Image (cartoon, rainbow, N blue to C red):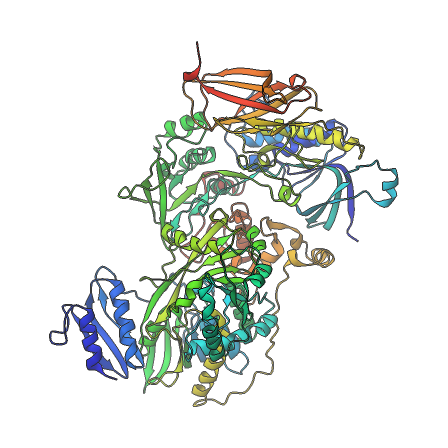
Amino acid sequence: MSLSKLRAGIAKRTGGDAGNFGALDVEVREEFSSVVLEGRVPDWRLKVELGWFAAGFGYKGVVNDLEVEGIEEERLAPSFPAGDRPLEGRSFDVAIIGGGVVGCAIARELAKWKVSAVLLEKEEDVAAHTSSRNDGMIHDGFAARPGTRKAAYNVRGNRLWEPLAGELRIDFSRPGSLVVFGSSAAKAAYPIMAARAKENGVDGWEFWSRKRLLAEEPNVTDGQHGAFFLPSAGIVSPYRATVALAESAAANGVEFSLGTCALGLEKEGGRITRVLTNRGDFRAAVVVNAAGNWSDAVAGMAGDRFFSLHQRRGVEMILDANAGRHLNHIMAMPSLLTVNRKTKGGGLVKTVEGNVLVGPTAAEAPGRENYATTAAELRELEKHLRLNKKLSPSMVITYFAGVRACTYEEDFIVERSERVPNLVHAAGIQSPGLASAPAVAEDVVRLALEALAATKRVSRNAAFVAARRAAPELRRLPFAERAALIAKNPAYGRIVCRCEEVSEGEIRDALRSPLPAASLDAVKRRARPGMGRCHGGFCTPRVMEIVADELGIPLDEVTKKGPGSRIACGQTKAGAEGGRQ
Amino acid sequence: MIPRERRDVVVLGGGPAGLAAALAASESGSDVLVVEREERLGGILKQCVHDGFGLVRFGEQLAGPEYARRYIDLVEGRRVAVSLETFVHSVRREAPAAARRAAAADGDPGFFVLTCVNRDRGVFELEARALVLATGCRERTDRQVFIHGDRPAGVLTAGLAQHLVNIEGLLPGRRAVILGSGDIGLIMARRLTLEGMEVEGVYELKSEPSGLSRNLRQCLEDFGIPLHLSTTVVEVHGKRRVEAVTVAAVDQRGQVLPGTERRVACDTLVLSVGLIPENEIAESLGLSLDPATKGPRVDQAGESQAEGVFVCGNALHVNDLADYVSESGEAAGRAAAAFAARNGAPAARGRLVPVKAGPGFLYAVPQFVDRGRPGKAVLYFRSNATLREGARFAARAIGPDGAPAATLLEKRYAALRPPEMERVEIDVALVPVDAAAVSLELERKEGLRG
């Protein structure tokens, strides 16, 4: 480690020299094997670039505390006020902070052991953030830089997903991924690509000639000269997968405390003793940090800041379900060949529901929860449509943004804290986080059990049930089975969402699941009403009625995503007098 | 075995189009069944508590539910079968069964079999000789007009706002911005104001309003609600509930003019940005859609290019008045009954003469005139621009040589506006047997001599 070299480099990049240490007010210091950047820079881009630069000097992590003019430092805070303190005074073996796919996968893995565990999620449901906001790809593992944790977890996670999806009773498919060669010369990269796939331990790869490519993907645009095919690339529904992991964990005894934000971690003798939240303070023997875009803040609560996150936005467009028939594989942009280490470049993905996803973009921007989209981002995505002759911008039905939680090392952090022995980090899990989650969860649980061993002997949970009890999806059942279910429960015969063919019974199932939905968005994640072409224009009032009925609340208290997001705000004059007309 | 019910005619949809179709088919002697997804008949009229319905049809001003009630009473009076809360999962054609095939004439198109779902009957099938699609339309959403920004609660379509207010008795918010000057948007501007909400303004991307003149007067002017033309909503703000929207002026091509952005505080954004005919079932039957109407191509009786499939109302094209929706339903119902009555006998369908709407039209319906259907044919059209000075309309039959062969109708209009649909009648007997097309022409007043 050479702090002086790093200082000189930073000085150069901020318009000065080692002597005056830059025209800008930037300081560099070492702290507990990490490097800390402090001071002020004029723009966000420079802050991120200095962070990346500092990551190249062999430190454990980069803590980037540079302030940027006009951009406020974001603070972790509850998304809405809590009405009660049910966790007050309780005690758990393990507390998991964060209900994204990583936290939920950890919770389920932990349920295989006899421990008491609680998962804290500050939103009204799991998968509320980037776990709902990605393309659902279970990457093959080719794109990750060889030797990184990302590469290893991705390849392992890819193998784990197929059996896991079977246990969770969710859709999983392996369409495989094509990296197309846009020129004859690009084909020359094949041996390099094959070598990389081999180094990463990817499960299979093939060279596809132009003829093979056209045979397998007939709508590929002219002028493609073949492809590098990775058969192991798969697809899940990311929010369904996350919810299913959570439901399985909940059914096996893990407690989920929603609307619960970690506010502090109290320590005694270097160990965390109590977790402070807006819904009560409790004791925890081990804490797992799976806080996604807030994982650096949670590390800070424990006095273990050795890394900072920066946010990389990814915007995706969803094409109409009709578009699905024009695409057979995941297709990546040839720009991948330029080996941009920060992103895999985006492309076309066919979802398990048959829609086509286009994207994602990759842009550094502040905002840990900034999911607003812009017109410019959509225009940028249109380039991917050039991979397929039949796809056009008129097929776009909706679009969304997610935020990747990136360290400056651009790699995952999966480890027991060096400073706080009962803290385990699953941090900086950016793409391919969904693909890697099952593998990350295995290691995190092993580490958590090691940490727990100091205070407790832990044995296997013999009562663990791997198969999730999934609610039926009637539109996919053979008619005889469907009729039998309706005969038993007529609510399955009342179709509420006409676009996605979702019945009242399925919505009630979502509201009674082991991790019950309590908002329209949460119902949507479980049963899909409102996901279709009318975007809930017709079914919203009906779903609201069912939610109100199940929760025992008035209709105007039904929310989109928890407190503060009511759909209606009171009754009309007639409504106040007589209720429903 | 899935239980099956047989009917002559099945009508999909129990709104003003479907009810009129069912009534007409029943009056023509057909055994009809109406399939309705919701728990009550009436379609969207159930929530249209404002008046203005029925002037053409009944010669009086009715509220939406009253208009629907007239048809429901007529349908119930004839004991037309209705299957409520019934969802059509899929529709397929089935050849006549072997036993019947022996008796069936050559070219028998067979039956339609609808697989349906209902809470009391489970999964069941409906079999019918003729099918009437009266499935109405749906609203365009915020994503379809590319609104960006946050995704909070408080963004809803005008129809959903109308349902919440008029059916559920709920107020969608306190202070609303309305995007789009379509009729439902205008009507909701008035409705929300009457219910005590503040409507900050109505914003319209185009340089002219999209709604009927009477609605502009009665819903905005009378209430002092400003209409901002050539202005649109570009961004929504608010993490959990809408806090504000950004509006901006646009040029003639709808592109935002930089520097004109303005933040408007509100907790509700109501969208009235267009309607799209619902044609999932039509498409599943292989019907081709007219890109101008987004509905199937049909003849003057609403029969599509697929024999035995009739389409009417807003599933065909988005009408301005419910009265015309019912009129097209009636034509489709009558023709569907006649089709069913032939019981598979060789088609009596005549030659389909394409209707070609020239420059100046947004669209015209029907897209074909069936020479084999005698009598009057009703044509609906919209101009593609406002013609304040007036216009001359002509319908001419074009002969096989491409030259006009007969003038079917000439008509002068004092003014034409795209939001206002026009209706004309032509006499099918005047269309020569060998006509290549029926050509519709629209001439601006300025171009008229004398």
Name the quarter where the C terminus of chain B is drawn.
Answer: top left
Q: Residue at x 13, y 68 (%)?
A: A23
User: Front-most of A569 and A369?
Assistant: A369
User: Front-most of A176 and B365?
Assistant: A176
Looking at the picture, how far across and down is residue B77, in whole percent?
71, 29
- Position of residue B214 in the picture relative to residue A28 (left or right): right
Q: Is residue A445 visible?
A: yes
- Position of residue B3 in the picture relative to residue A125 (left or right): right
- Position of residue A172 in the picture relative to residue B246 (left or right): right
Looking at the picture, how far across and down is residue A194, in whole percent?
49, 74
Residue A104 against residue B318 in the figure, above or below: below
Looking at the picture, how far across and down is residue A497, in whole percent?
58, 50
Residue reaching furthest to the left: A20
- Position of residue A111 in the picture relative to residue A143 (left or right): right
Q: Is residue A90 visible?
A: no
Q: Quadrant of residue B85?
A: top right
User: Front-most of A91 and A212?
Assistant: A212
